[in-house]
Image: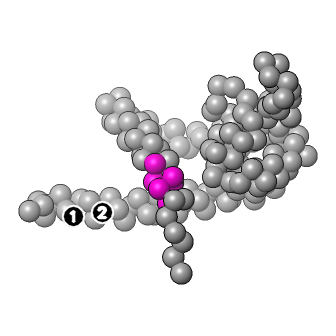
Amino acid sequence: MTDPHRARLYEELATESRRYHAAFVLFNQAVADHLGLHPTDVQALSLLTVEPEPLTVRQIADMTGLTTGSATRLVDRLERGGYVARTPDVRDRRRVLVTPVPERLARVTAVWDELGRTWQTLLDEHSEDELKAITRHMRRANDLSRTQIQRLRTLPKPD
């Protein structure tokens, strides 16, 4: 049988996790509204900037779960806004890469940097071991999320 104290901790964690996820979605919406972008565009920019190399539209579609048509429209919007450029792949001329435009991304980065200082003070309260545990948890949660996303995409939709 599960320890009642641990069960209560799981329940509290589940509740706070739901609040955290909702707060993040609403925060992302507020950032997008502030920048005049779609929330998916903000997240796509975030993903593009953490990747070591430019991505193809197909890779963006795979990362975001969008269809290639929707990913193309997303890239079109970002390109019109000056956030990305389509560039030919020098290794494979048949491919086009989506490359972030650093000068335009500075606008987004400035907002993140300003908001990030407050987040940093929250993290400053933690020891190095706690930061390592939080990072390990976030990495594992990200991996699990990807697995669960793939699983959900294979399940039939409920009526």
- Can residue 45 be seen? no
Name the residue that disc number 2 marks. 12
Q: Which residues are magenta?
A: 147-152
Q: Amino acid at mark 1?
A: Arg
Q: Main secondary structure of the magenta part?
A: helix
The relative height of residue 120 versus residue 21 in the rendered view (above or below) is above
Of all residues, the one furthest to the left in this rendering is: 1
* Residue 96 percent across, percent down from the top left: 83, 32
* Residue at 54% in and 59% down: 153
* Residue at 64% in and 31% down: 51
Q: Please give the label number shown on residue 153.
A: none
Of all residues, the one furthest to the top in this rendering is: 91
* Residue at 75% in and 50% down: 68
- 98 inside magenta stretch: no
The relative height of residue 34 versus residue 87 in the rendered view (above or below) is below
Verify CB contact (< 8 Å) between mark 1 and mark 2: yes
* Residue 137 percent across, percent down from the top left: 38, 41
Binning the other alpha carbons within 10 Å of mark 2 as few (below 14), some (14 to 19) or many (20 upward) gives few
Q: Amino acid at mark 2?
A: Glu
- Can residue 66 be seen? yes
Say which quarter of the image contains residue 95. top right
Name the residue that disc number 1 marks. 8
Secondary structure beneath dot 2 equals helix
Position of 116 with respect to 92 (left or right) is left
Secondary structure beneath dot 1 equals helix
Of all residues, the one furthest to the bottom in this rendering is: 159
Binning the other alpha carbons within 10 Å of mark 1 as few (below 14), some (14 to 19) or many (20 upward) gives few
